[in-house]
């Protein structure tokens, strides 16, 4: 099949747009869409230092690669931050891949581990606990990234969340009927102590991200986390993929629909002012931040502000 824009052979048929794209036009389309996302969301300002969360998987690898290219002529500094949650048989390989891409692009990399920050590997936090592994993982990863970004003096944290992730998160909150959480999904304003988070790949389908890595010949670790199938997200992902293949564009319309609702609801769900956690000083809604609350459940009794444990 021929490319819709030139005589070259197409490497992808975008069912949602109706275009067939050759390698060159695919890469151009991909990077233009990411640039548009950055622009619409006013995500990056001149002289910003951006801490890019790089796990070594395809999303964050594509993110680092693509930002590096798009921002090449701008006065923006990129630094890679890799979180080692401590997941045996999984994280070691992804960290190697993260190291390789940072090195290849000549970008400084910092690794922060759950063990150093909180005293435990994720594998040690999980057994026999009522809380799902992904809950621990998500809370501590966010916390660790925020703390690392502050230490590095970063203005923003960029994560590799893609269109599939966004549509899944929205759908999961619909399914749980958790409207409050859904509304919090779209941050309205900057909060003290919280480094603003940006998601430059939020409009990009997961499959195109994988293809972008492939055509740019960057190696990514495709291994799946051993805890991934224990979450509601895994079922929602299958459901959304099934709908997308029958009705192309479903993921995009899920996100668009949510944005319309969120715009209408703006003001009705006032964003709370965040306080400082009384244990560690990180921003939080209650007295303790989520990370310290979970650490309490683990029975550590001590805060992660004490880095010596
Ligand atoms: Fe963490 Fe869950 Fe992702 Fe595994 S699947 S890395 S436990 S959030
Ligand atoms: Zn705390």
Image (cartoon, rainbow, N blue to C red):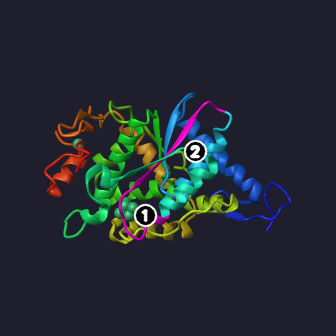
Q: Is residue 57 visible?
A: no
Mark 2 residue's CB less than 8 Å from ligand 1: no
> 273 and 266: which one is in front?
273
Determine the residue positioned at 33% across, 46% down. Answer: 143
Looking at the image, residue 67 lies above or below residue 59: above
Determine the residue positioned at 26% across, 65% down. Answer: 124
SS label for mark 1: helix
Q: Residue 170 location in percent, x, y?
A: 40, 54
**Mark toward the start of the polypeptide (2 vs 1):** 1
Looking at the image, residue 236 lies above or below residue 74: below
**Residue 186 placement: quadrant:** top left
Residue 46 in the magenta stretch? The answer is no
Contact (CB < 8 A) between labels 2 and 1? Answer: no
Residue 90 in the magenta stretch? The answer is yes
Q: Is residue 187 left or right of residue 22?
A: left
Q: Is residue 114 visible?
A: yes
Part of the protein shown in magenta: 74-93
Q: Residue 35 location in percent, x, y?
A: 62, 41
In terms of image quarters, where does ligand 2 lie?
A: top left
> 2 and 298: which one is in front?
298
Q: Quadrant where the N terminus lies?
A: bottom right
- Check disc 1: other Cα within 10 Å, few if <14, some if 14-19, many if 20+: many
Mark 1 residue's CB less than 8 Å from ligand 1: no
Determine the residue positioned at 33% across, 67% down. Answer: 231
Q: Which residue is mark 1?
A: 91
Q: Residue 263 location in percent, x, y?
A: 42, 38
Q: Is residue 185 left or right of residue 155?
A: left
Q: Which residue is mark 2?
A: 107
- Check disc 2: other Cα within 10 Å, few if <14, some if 14-19, many if 20+: some
SS label for mark 2: loop
Numbered tag placed on residue 63 in the rendering: none
């Amino acid at each position: 099949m021929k490319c819709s824009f030139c005589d070259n052979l197409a490497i992808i048929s975008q069912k949602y747009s109706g275009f067939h794209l050759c390698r060159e036009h695919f890469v151009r389309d991909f990077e233009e869409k990411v640039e548009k996302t950055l622009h619409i969301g006013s995500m990056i300002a001149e002289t910003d230092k951006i801490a890019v969360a790089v796990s070594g998987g395809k999303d964050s690898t594509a993110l680092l690669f693509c930002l590096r290219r798009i921002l090449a002529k701008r006065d923006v500094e990129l630094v890679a931050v890799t979180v080692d949650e401590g997941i045996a048989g999984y994280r070691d390989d992804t960290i190697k891949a993260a190291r390789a891409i940072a090195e290849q692009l000549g970008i400084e990399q910092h690794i922060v581990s759950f063990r150093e920050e909180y005293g435990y590997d994720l594998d040690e936090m999980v057994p026999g606990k009522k809380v799902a592994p992904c809950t621990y993982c998500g809370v501590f990863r966010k916390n660790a990234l925020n703390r690392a970004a502050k230490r590095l003096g970063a203005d923003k944290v960029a994560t590799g969340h893609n269109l599939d992730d966004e549509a899944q998160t929205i759908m999961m909150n619909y399914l749980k009927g958790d409207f409050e959480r859904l509304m919090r999904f779209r941050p309205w304003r900057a909060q003290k102590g919280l480094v603003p988070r940006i998601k430059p790949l939020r409009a990009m389908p997961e499959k195109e991200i994988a293809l972008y890595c492939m055509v740019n010949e960057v190696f990514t670790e495709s291994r799946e986390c051993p805890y991934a199938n224990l979450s509601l997200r895994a079922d929602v992902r299958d459901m959304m993929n099934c709908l997308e293949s029958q009705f192309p564009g479903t993921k995009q319309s899920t996100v668009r629909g949510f944005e319309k609702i969120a715009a209408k609801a703006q003001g009705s769900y006032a964003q709370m002012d965040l306080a400082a956690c009384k244990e560690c000083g990180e921003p939080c809604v209650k007295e303790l931040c989520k990370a310290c609350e979970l650490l309490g459940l683990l029975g550590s009794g001590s805060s992660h502000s004490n880095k010596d444990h």
